[in-house]
Every structure is written in structure tokens, then in C-alpha cells.
Amino acid sequence: MAKIAVSLPRPLMWPLTLPTLPKNLFPVLLSLVLLGMVGAPLIVLAIASLRPPNALPFADAGWTLSNLRTVFLEADTYSLLHNTFVYAAGSLALALPLAFCLAWLVERTDLPGRHVLYTAMFVPMVIPPFAVAIGWIFLLNPNNGLLNNWIRDVLALDLMRGPFNIYSVWGMIFVTGLLSVPSMWLMFLPLFRNSDPRLEEAAATSGAGRLQTLVRVTVPLMAPGVLAVLVYFTVIYIEIFEIPLALGLTANYPVLSTKIFLLVNAEEIGEVAYAIAAAFGMMFVIIGVVLMGLYLFAVRLSARFAVVTGKGYRPGLVKLGAWKYVALGAIGAYFLLAVLLPFLILLWTSLLPFYRTPSLRALDLLTIANYTKIFQQREFLLALQNTVIVAAAAASVSMLLASLISWFVVRRPGWLSRSLAVLSFTPLAIPAVVLALAILLLYKGTPIQATLSILILAFATRYLAFTTRVMHAAQLQIEKSLEEAGLVAGARPITTFALINLRLLLPALVNGWVWVVAHAVRDFTIPLFMAFANTLMLANLIFLYVGAGRQGMYTAYMVVLIVMVVVIAFVARLRFGSQPGSAH
Amino acid sequence: MVEQGKLVIEDLHMTYPTTEGPVRAVRGVGFSVEPGEFYTLLGASGCGKTTTLRCVAGLELPDAGRISIGEQVVYSSAEQIMEPPYRRDIGMVFQSYAIWPHLNVFANVSFPLVAGRRRPPRRLVREKTMRALSLVHLEALAFRPAPFLSGGQQQRVALARALVAEPKVLLLDEPLSNLDAKLRAEMQIEIKNLVKSLGVTTLYVTHDQTEALTMSDKVAVMRDGVLVEEAMPRAIYLRPNSAYTATFLGDTNLIAGTIVGRSASDGMCHVDTELGRMRCPAPHWPQEQDSVWVCYRPEGVSLTLEDPQRVNVFQGHITAAIFTGDQVTYRIEAGGRVIQAKTDPHSSFAHNERVFVQLAPEKCLLIRRGDDTVQDSSTDR
């Protein structure tokens, strides 16, 4: 029996004539840019970790291993890690089934209103988790949380506190899991959209029932893609900061990210422990690198199952029948918990000088005084401007880089492309808190240290892994012959790229861009580390008011931020977005 | 109607990497296609035919050789020339059609005129596009979005797109392999008539010999990167030069034999075979003691119940009778080996029936017997 030699993927040509620009010029340039964005902060981190506890990395303060010893050898660290992983695992267990089922419902069934859902899911995606956490504090704090009160009344429980306590790892998991459903769902969509339903039809015609097909065909085909998403979110959960900040500190449940924040935001300037924070950062990075390796492996696996072809693409839909009410009910419950309840309580509070339990009497006290105050503040307008500029610029830079990188990685396989891919995923291994810290330290003393540029740089770097992943997955799905046909039809490579490749990538591009803008606007991590004086963003203002306990003000700000972000996402999708399921 | 171009390929070499190491896909292939000619590269998977076509298209970078389309040298390793696909005057139909899903039919077909090298004014674009669509009978679907087309329709769109810019050379990479049998048969004739009426030079790649024989002016058989034989369809089928070609194209009976004598009077020679003594027309080359194959097409075998009293008649019995609709295929054991015969569907010899097999001398073909392996030795048992 002859062995079949498997042909390795051959690079798409980019030749002009034989003696011409070195073929690798473009990817080499890209690599240098990436190295600057990603490698430099890592190096600064390493240097910083070897300095005495309070010293800056480039200060002339000598070297020491004491920080690394503290971090790697003390028992405290490992209980910290334990906390972090339990929190991550719980959030994953909550979010994954929800997101997967939802993706299936949207892509493969006749769920009514699934087009609306597609737009509606952007709302929980763009709401700042910090705000939602604060909202849930109003709802479920053990003393006077609104829902706790109601439950106690309705069930006639004889308790002083509870029954639920949002200040716990369960509370953290609950909020985190709920809020990560939209992003996870967004990553599952391409898996469904581009997996050939005829593969499932083949199973059905071979006699497999719905469940059998699901278990033996659909799930295994998607398994690598699901694994990739799983690993990606594990890294996210490990580094997530806002919810542990809002809930974990009071719950006495520290995780790695909050630990680093505390080290860097000590009250006294002299006590800021950059070096130890950097040492923790190094450990964080090592964990991240291991997970990243796993992620790349999963992505490589899922590439084998890429399917979009130039012919015969027609998805079939499952009829839900009476089950659609169950599905709609579940989706309604999700939105209630993830969006409506926290938002309403924030809205309520923002219309009062400080929190009061909602009641008919309290209705008389409602006022929009907080809002008028906000809009008259100079610092609000400045923060708004900063936020918009940073978000849009970071999204554009990140998506552009991601498109170029992904094109090279997919069309020009080789060692150079592989290193490009690895470099672009590296930011994933660097938690936001550590990245922010590293970039701050790197550019301290340079002209750009107090400008919006480092914020843009930080955000673009932070989201590079996501944008590259999205564009990579989208690019993989475009059959090489679609581009070849363009070349043969007489269109130059740039024209082919723009008219065919980019046009087919447009849905992914738009989705990705909006995702980055939404995440940048609502982010509380990078602004809290890196924004000062005249580069303050909206998140900073909110944090200041939270620290001061000004409930009316900070809830009003949160409502403004939420509305702003929702409007952005909505408008962008209406103008540029595509309907699900169409090829346009 | 279409500017004609001659396609010349000289000494083409191409290697590409695989998991088992580098594979020499094209080894010194050279041929030329006259202006307006329909030339087919025929061979099994992996023989290098598609790679050769892609080299002509400019989608692969060969190792060495020379390719010219009309006056333009598009590739030459000696002169360091490599024109990219978008600078070659070609049209190509891909095996998967490569119809762009985000465009409608009109936009797909007009793309070469809108985004290609030569961009006529808008009015002319519309005219040419509709004309190309009418050539493939798709004018009515001009504004349908591409994903809503059937396979056959997509294939026609691909064809129209390849022809709309009136290229010098049309390249087709197994365009019919994904169609059902009936449609395939129709499209073979349609494509052939279309390109002939336009007079465009055509290079066609396929593994299906029926397609090759039906459509081509010339057929070239490729094997393991080498061009084995090139001839017109009739010649390559009835008078192949090698056992490989004989067995690749259709079924054949290959009977091993040795020349034992020539007859000067009627230009025949005597061949000693496992069946017995045979008389065959002798081309100039066989000498006595030469080893030959006697190549005999099953369609030419005649079966009778009584001895016809002619030369080249052998006795045997039927071991299989397979009805295939337009023919009946028989396996006859004679002289210790199997002979395959194909007759019209009305014949009805029974299993184990004793018959006489006649292999008419004028239908015998002698082929050199060396150490070349045969394509399919199922008749040689």
C-alpha cells in the first residue's frame, strides 16, 4: 500500500519578477513592530524584577534576586494562585455552556428574533464589569442588598444577613461568568458558521439521531475550536482585575491581579513596590506562556477543520417548535441578571443623592441633579474626549496589524510567519495590570510618558492577541483559490487583497473593531494604572468617586458610560455590521 | 473573435515540499498548443498535470524551464523572467470554481474588466459581461448573489469570468469533476463548442479519459511528472505507443508475446503468445525474438458460438457477463488467461458457455514490451 505524502501548504505567490524586493521585507518589518510593542515591555519587566523592591528598572540601584525568591518560594503566593484558579475555573464552568448553547441557537436554529439577539448581545458585552459589580453590590450585599431584602421578606427568613453574599468567590464567579458570555459567544459563532452543516447531514443520513450527531460529529469537529476558546478565556479570567477589585477585596479573596494592584498603588510613593510587582508579573507571564502554547496547539488543530468554499454553501436550520419558549425565557433571564437588574439599580441610585431602597415613597425624591452636575464639569468633557480618541485609535491600529499579520501567517507559512503568530499572541500571556505597569516603566522619562500615546499603545498591545485571533480565524476560512482567481483575473495583489480578501473579511473586521472600542472605553485596568492629570479617562473619574463614596455621582457616571458605550456599539453595527448568516 | 496565442512550454521542472521530502512534480515537461487548439493533459492524481497548469497560470514558481504565451515570455529561468498571473493574458477556471461569495453573478464575471489589467469604459464592460453571460446561457441570472447558485451554474459563471476579457489562453483545472454524470456529459460538449466558436487556445487538465477524448484536439498523457505520449484522440486510443497509455485509456487486453517471423507479402508478422500463434500487422520496428505486447481493445473482440475459421481465433469459456446498459462486458478464459470483450447489449452468452474469440488482425496493435509497468493489470490474469 503506497504511503501518501501529504503536501505542505504552499505559500501564495507575491512575486513581481524574480530579482525584486526581498519577499520577506514586509513580514520582517511587521516583526520589528511587534517586537517593539510586545518584547520591550517584557524585557523591562524582567529588569524591574531584579531591582531592589522600591527601585525603578532603569535606576542605578543594583541587582537582587530577593523579589523572585519572595514571589516563587513563599506559601502566600500559592494560596493566591489557588484562589485565582478556582475563580477562573468557576467562571469558565458558568460561561461556557451558556455561550455555546447560545451560539448554537443563533447559528443553527430558527429561534425567532435571533437577528435582534445578535445586536442585543452587544449590550452585556460592552457594559463595564466594574459597573455591573457595583450594581450587584447594591442588589446582593449581605446587609441591605435589595434582592436579599426581598428574598428575606418573601420567604420569611429569620436572618440578619444574606442569604446571598456578593462579597464572596461565588459572587465573583457569578458576575464574571455572566459578563463573559457575549465575548465567548462571539468566538463560538465562527465555529458554527463555518462548519459545514453537510457534515452533520451526512451523519443524519447515516442514521444518527440529533443527539448522536451532536456528540459524534458536531462536538468533535468543534472541539479544537472550543478548546482554543477555553484556553483563551482561562487566561482572561486569571488576569481579570475589575471584578476582583470591586468584590474580591471586601470578600478577602485576593487574586494575582489585585495583589499587583495593591503593590503598585500603595498610599506612599516611596512604598510602591515596582520590583516585587514585576516579579509577580514574571510568574504571571510564565503561566501565561504555558497556557498560550496550549492555545496555539488548539488553534492549529481547528485550522484543519476550516471549510468555507467557493461553492455550495448553504446552512440548514433546526426547528425548535415549543422549545423556543424555553430558549427565549432563558435568554430573557440572562439579560435580566447580566444587564437589566444591575443597570436599573444604578439608574435608580443615580437619580438620588445617595442610595435608598426603591419604594413608592422614594419616587418623590428622584432628581437629575447628579447628571446636570456631570455635564457641567470640565473634567468630564476632557475625560470623554480622551476616552474616545484612545479607543478608536487603539482599535484601528490593532485591527490593521492583526489583518496584516494574519494574512502572512495564513498565506505565507514558514518560520517567519510562525514567529509573527507567536509574537502577536504573547500579549495574552501578559496580564493587563502587568502590561500597563511595564509600558509605564518603559516610557518613564520619555516625551510620550504623559500623553495619550502610551494609552493607545497599551490598549493596542493588550488587544492584539484577540484581534489577531479573530482575523486569523477569518482568514483561514477564505479559500486560497478565491484570491488566486483574483490574481488570474488580472488584479494586482493589493487590489485582490482589498476587493476580495478584505471584503470577505469585513464582517470579522467590523466585529473586531467594535469589540476593541467597546472594551477600551469600558476598561478600568489600564486607565487606573496609566492615566494621570490631563490623560484621565472616564474610568478614572468613576474610580475617584467610588473611593470617595459619592454614590449619586459615581452611579450617574456609570450610567452615562454605559449609555455611551451601548450607543457606540449599536451605531457601528448598524452602519457597518452585517446580518448573521449572510455572505455580504 | 479572440486574439489567438500559441502556448509553448519547454523543459519545465518543478519541485515542491511534502511531509515525506521534496517531490519532483514536473520533470522536463515540454509541449506546445497551437492557436485555437484544445489540448488536454490527462493523467492520474499526482502525475503533475495540475502543477503544470498552475505554472502556466503563474500560480507556482517552477524550478526551471520556459513558458511563453503568444509573443510574451511569461516564465524563463534562463532569462530570470517570472510574470505574475495578473500580467499574463490568461483566463482560468478552478476546480472549485472560486466564485466570490460576496459578489453577484455580474460582478463576478465583470471582475477582470473592472479590476484587471485592461479596463474598458463602463458601457463596454456591461456589454462584454452580458455577452460572456449569454455564451454560457446565464443572462437571466446576472444579478443573483453567488451563494444562491447551483454547482453547474457556478461553473458556468467561472467559465464566463475566464472568457470575458478575451484571453489568449484559457486554462481549465478539472472543471467538471464536481458535477453529476449527466451534467458533465452536457458540459463537455458545451465547453468544447464554446471555445471552438471563440477560437481561444485551451489547456485542459483532467483525470477522466472520456472528457479528454471527447473534447480535445490533442491529448497528452502524463505520469509521475513526465509527459508520456501526445497524440490526437483517435490515435492515442487506437494506436498508443506504450502499455501504460494503452491501459490508462480505457480497458485493453494486453497479451505478452514474442515475434517469431515476418511475412513479406502482406506486411504481417507472426507472434507467439500465451493464447497461441497470432498474426498482427507489423510496423517496421519488430525484429525476430523481440518481446511485444499485443494490444487489443475489448470492443473489437468478436464472439461466436461456432468456429469462424479465421486467423487469430481461440476457444474459451465465459467466466463473467456484466451488463452495463449500453454494453455487455464479458470475461472469457482462453489459453490460460482472461480476455475481456465488450459487445452490444443484445448479446446474451451464458456463464460457462463455450465460445470462439476472434481477435481480428487489423485491430491488433503491437507495443514494445520492456519493463514499464501497466496502469491496470486486471485484464492480465
Image (cartoon, helix red, strand yellow):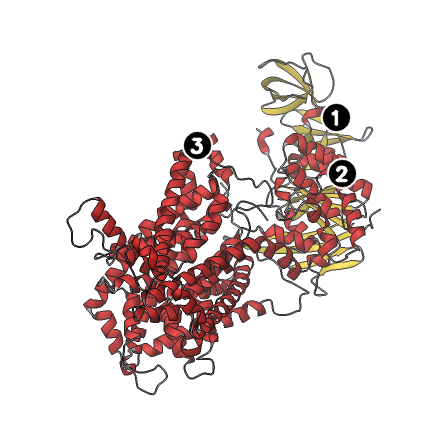
**Of the residues shown, which amino acid type is indicated by label 2?**
Lys
Q: Which residue is mark 3?
A: A321
In the drawing, what numbered circle is on residue A326? none
For the residue labelled by badge 1, is the local secondary structure a helix, a strand or a loop?
helix
- Chain under label 3? A
Residue B277 percent location from the top left of the image? 68, 25
**Of the residues shown, which amino acid type is indicated by label 3?**
Gly
Marker count (numbered): 3
Mark 1 vs mark 2: in front = 2
State whether residue A569 is above or below residue A56.
above
Q: Which residue is mark 1?
A: B361
State whether residue A96 is above or below residue A321.
below
Instruction: Compute the Cα span from label 3 to label 2.
Output: 51 Å
- Chain under label 2? B
The answer to whether one can see residue B21 in this image is no
Residue B111 percent location from the top left of the image? 71, 52
Quick one: A350 or A421, which is closer to the camera? Answer: A350
Q: Which residue is mark 2?
A: B192
The answer to whether one can see residue A366 in this image is yes
Residue A489 percent location from the top left of the image? 70, 53
For the residue labelled by badge 2, is the local secondary structure a helix, a strand or a loop?
helix
Instruction: Compute the Cα span from label 3 to label 1.
Output: 73 Å
Residue A215 percent location from the top left of the image? 38, 38
Q: Relative to residue A452, is residue B370 drawn left or right?
A: right
Q: Are marks 3 and 2 on the same chain?
A: no
What residue is shown at x 81% (from left), y 28% (from top)? B266
Mark 3 vs mark 2: in front = 3
Q: Relative to residue B281, is residue B317 drawn left or right?
A: left
